[in-house]
Image (cartoon, rainbow, N blue to C red):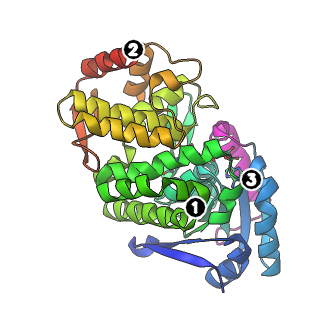
Amino acid sequence: MPAIAHTVHVALGERAYDILIGDRLLEDAGAILAERFPGRRFGIVTDATVAQTQLPRLQRSLDAAGLLHTPIIVPAGEGSKSWAQLQYVTEAILAARLERGDAVIALGGGVIGDLAGFAASIARRGMDLIQMPTSLLAQVDSSVGGKTGINSPHGKNLVGAFHQPRLVLADLSTLDTLAPRQFAAGYAEVVKYGLIDDEDFFFWLEANRAEIFGGGAARGEAIARCCRHKARVVIEDEREQGVRALLNLGHTFGHALEKDTGFGDRLLHGEGVAIGMVLAHAFSARLGLAPSQDTGRVQAHLQAAGLPTTLGDIAGGVGSTQTLMAAIAQDKKVSRGALTFILTRGIGQAFIERNVDPAAVAQFLDDMRG
Ligand code: NAD
């Protein structure tokens, strides 16, 4: 029997799918896929790091179930969300003679999910996608919801497609090989769900953080709660025309900081989001919308999780306010010159504000750099 601890159904009509969460699910992947996708062949897109530890597990499992598969390996890191790697993966899918009725498996973190998902959406005019997320960030966020894409020199995630997976299989044991810094970065997205509209979840996280980091039962529970939250939002607003934008809490500041630091090791995506969420709370407090003690509480929790929370925490510092504002203006969450931000009335009370004054943001950033 597969060790599925939690099943979350994403009820999207004909695009509906399940998220299966459990320990050592990769060992059951062959049996699960043979039952749900009989007769298919699989292209397994992964990165060089995940290929070392997780790919052999998946391959053994598919072999045991008699399923044919071809690995497609790209370098690890955000740099692989590029035109060059999109071309490489798409051509590799075609070279492996995978047909339209076959499927692409994304085995890896958010980079692999976004890249492989986008390739699956265009190869042979669209192939089925199976997400097997191996980072915390991917398990709680990027593998669910169908956003796929790559980065452009003009900014992050500016080229892509909505392409829902047919199945998400999240093996908790893959997180055992994840670097602690990457785990913490993913945790920022976990906290985000509490901050958006679930104050109880944030309080639960405050009480259970140690167990989540330690790998206890609370880890699977936290991941399942995040998936349920994301599934709910995606069902309500699949194409981000409304409430789904709330999931971008902390991301407008975060993306600008990521861009400024070169989308690399100086600041991981989740780390940018952590600083961005604190800034979103502080900015909301400055506008008189939220109590300032909430900013302190959010900051303390993220700090305790080992995350950066201020501009001063970024190794090597950040560019000028002008540079950051240019990055914010280029972010896709800008509509006709007005800045759109996710602001908050307090923990668990985020909302979309489409008319934020750029001068107020610039002044705020000036003050935040101290
Ligand atoms: P990532 O895919 O680069 O993974 C982080 C690092 O951890 C990589 O070096 C990877 O090789 C390594 N890794 C992953 N799993 C591992 C494991 N089990 N053991 C050892 N090492 C492992 O990055 P990420 O943090 O997972 O995802 C960030 C990306 O996700 C960003 O590009 C972001 O834009 C995207 N994202 C997308 C969505 C969406 O809805 N599509 C949502 C949030 C974030």
Tell me which segment is drawn in magenta: 76-101
Q: Position of residue 105 (x, y in %)?
A: 67, 63
Decide if ligand 1 comes within 8 Å of the CB at mark 3: yes
Q: Residue at x 45, y 63 (%)?
A: 227
Image quadrant in which you'd find residue 46: bottom right
Q: Sequence order check: which comes first, mark 2 or mark 1?
A: 1
Q: Residue at x 23, y 36 (%)?
A: 354
Nearest the eye: 298 or 88: 298
Q: Which mark is residue 126?
A: 1
**Residue 215, placed above or below residue 185:** below
Q: CA distance from mark 2 to mark 1?
A: 49 Å
Q: Which mark is residue 50?
A: 3
Q: Which mark is residue 203?
A: none
Decide if ligand 1 comes within 8 Å of the CB at mark 1: no
Q: Residue at x 21, y 37 (%)?
A: 291
**On the rendered structure, is 205 left or right of 212?**
left
Graded by Cα atoms within 10 Å as few (under 14), some (14 to 19) or many (20 or more), the crowding at tag 3 reads many
Residue 285 showing in the rendered view? yes
Q: Which residue is mark 2?
A: 370
**Residue 256, placed above or below residue 45:** above
Q: Is residue 89 magenta?
A: yes
**Residue 94, placed above or below residue 61:** above
Of circles 2 and 1, the one toward us is 2
Q: Position of residue 17 (x, y in %)?
A: 49, 73
